[in-house]
Image (cartoon, rainbow, N blue to C red):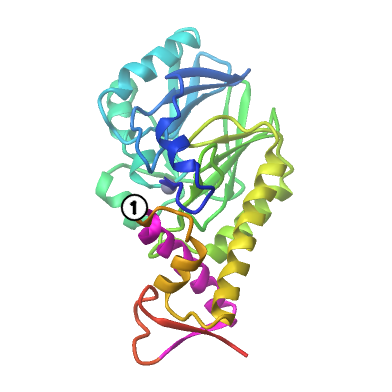
């Protein structure tokens, strides 16, 4: 899941209008199959990846399970030289990544399905999950994926280093279009920022995101993401200094140039920043209404 509201103004149009080919070769070891699920939240749709060089390859992510994806996946397997699927690996359990696992496994398997378990996301899909976690490696001919636990967008989120190319599959943590949503209930912006630092430490070359095109210069994109969040945080602190206490008021200042239709989504983004600042002890909620971060009154701690 992605969003364009908190990035530049033009991103919405880019996100909705961007077209990507169904099947693309991104490197010697990586071929994409587009998930056929375009939307304002997924951009051109979810990128799924065939990884490896042999007769059977890893499928990384599976789209959201719509039937139109299966022929596209077959086309990708065909373009790789008529190869099979060795196993499925998932970045995380959001529906646009895990949703196709069952139908792919029925058509091309059964195959092993690996992810970092998280019952709240996994259970609705009723899959048998092979548990993997930070540091684990998944190998296929010509390619090794090393898992990095990178929570924040989702608690179960793994990114994967493609060791032979020092490339990084970033899932929804870094995107080729728009910016990552931190969902209020299961996301955590503080964790997300630490995950970005961790990904930077891997000194990746190219990034292969779950939505949008390949990113050639990984470190500068990750630094751009960090700078974007820190700049937003500073804007929020400034609106608090100026005496705005409600998210609605902060949004109307910070997002003044954005269409009103995006303000609700922007409010969620501001809420995720305030929750991070609260965890850090830099802001607090005032009585009487403190339960819902979106309607609470926020003030700076001295
Ligand atoms: Zn996601």
Task: Measuring from the top left, give residue 92's x and y in whole percent.
Answer: 44, 46
Q: Quadrant of residue 289?
A: bottom left
Q: Residue 154: horizontal and vertical position, in percent?
A: 45, 55
Q: Residues within 10 Å of mark 1 (few under 14, many from 20)?
A: some
The residue at the point 34 percent across, 37 percent down is 39
| Residue 287 lies in quadrant | bottom left
Q: Residue furthest front?
A: 257
**Which residue is drawn at the image coordinates 33% and 49% (left, top)?**
122
Q: Does the magenta stretch include residue 22?
A: no
Q: On screen, 72 above or below 148? A: above
Is 132 in front, or is 297? Answer: 297
Is 275 within the magenta?
yes
Query: Looking at the image, is 255 positioned above or below residue 114?
Result: below
Coordinates of residue 110 in the picture (x, y in percent): 33, 27
Q: Dot 1 lies on which element?
A: helix
Residue nearer the viewer, 59 or 39: 39
Identity of the residue drawn at 70% across and 39% down: 204
What span is in magenta?
262-286
Q: In this view, does 189 lie to the left or right of 48?
A: right
**Residue occupied by mark 1:** 121
**Mark 1 Cβ inside 8 Å of ligand 1:** no
Q: Which quadrant of the figure contains the C terminus?
A: bottom right
* Residue 38 as seen in the image, left or right of residue 192: left
> Which secondary structure dominates the residues rendered in magenta?
helix
- Looking at the image, which is closer to me, 293 or 264? 264
Does residue 43 sit above or below 115 in this rendering?
A: above
The image quarter in which residue 221 lies: top right
Horizontal and vertical percent position of residue 132:
50, 46
């Amino acid at each position: 899941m992605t969003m364009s509201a908190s990035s530049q103004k033009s991103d919405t149009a880019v996100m909705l209008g961007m077209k990507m080919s169904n099947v693309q070769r991104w490197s010697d070891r990586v071929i994409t199959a587009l998930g056929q699920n375009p939307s304002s939240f997924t951009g051109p749709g979810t990128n799924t990846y065939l990884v490896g060089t042999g007769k059977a390859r890893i499928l990384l992510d599976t789209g959201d399970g719509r039937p139109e994806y299966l022929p596209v996946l077959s086309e990708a397997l065909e373009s790789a030289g008529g190869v099979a699927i060795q196993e499925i690996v998932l970045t995380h359990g959001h529906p646009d990544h895990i949703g196709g696992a069952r139908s792919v496994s029925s058509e091309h398997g059964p195959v092993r399905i690996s992810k970092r378990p998280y019952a709240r996301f996994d259970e609705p899909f009723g899959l048998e999950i092979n548990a993997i976690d930070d540091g684990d490696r998944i190998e296929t001919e010509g390619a090794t994926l090393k898992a990095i636990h990178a929570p924040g967008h989702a608690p179960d989120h793994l990114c994967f280093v493609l060791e032979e190319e020092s490339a990084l599959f970033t899932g929804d943590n870094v995107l080729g279009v728009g910016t990552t949503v931190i969902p209020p209930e299961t996301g955590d912006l503080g964790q997300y920022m630490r995950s970005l630092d961790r990904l930077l430490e891997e000194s990746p070359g190219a990034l292969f995101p779950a939505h949008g095109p390949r990113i050639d210069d990984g470190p500068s994109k990750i630094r751009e993401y960090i700078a974007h969040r820190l700049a937003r945080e500073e804007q929020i602190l400034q609106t608090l200094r100026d005496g705005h206490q409600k998210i609605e008021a902060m949004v109307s200042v910070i997002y003044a140039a954005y269409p009103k239709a995006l303000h609700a989504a922007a409010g969620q983004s501001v809420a995720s920043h305030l929750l991070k600042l609260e965890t850090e002890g830099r802001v607090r909620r005032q009585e009487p209404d403190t339960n819902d971060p979106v309607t609470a009154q926020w003030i700076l701690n001295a």
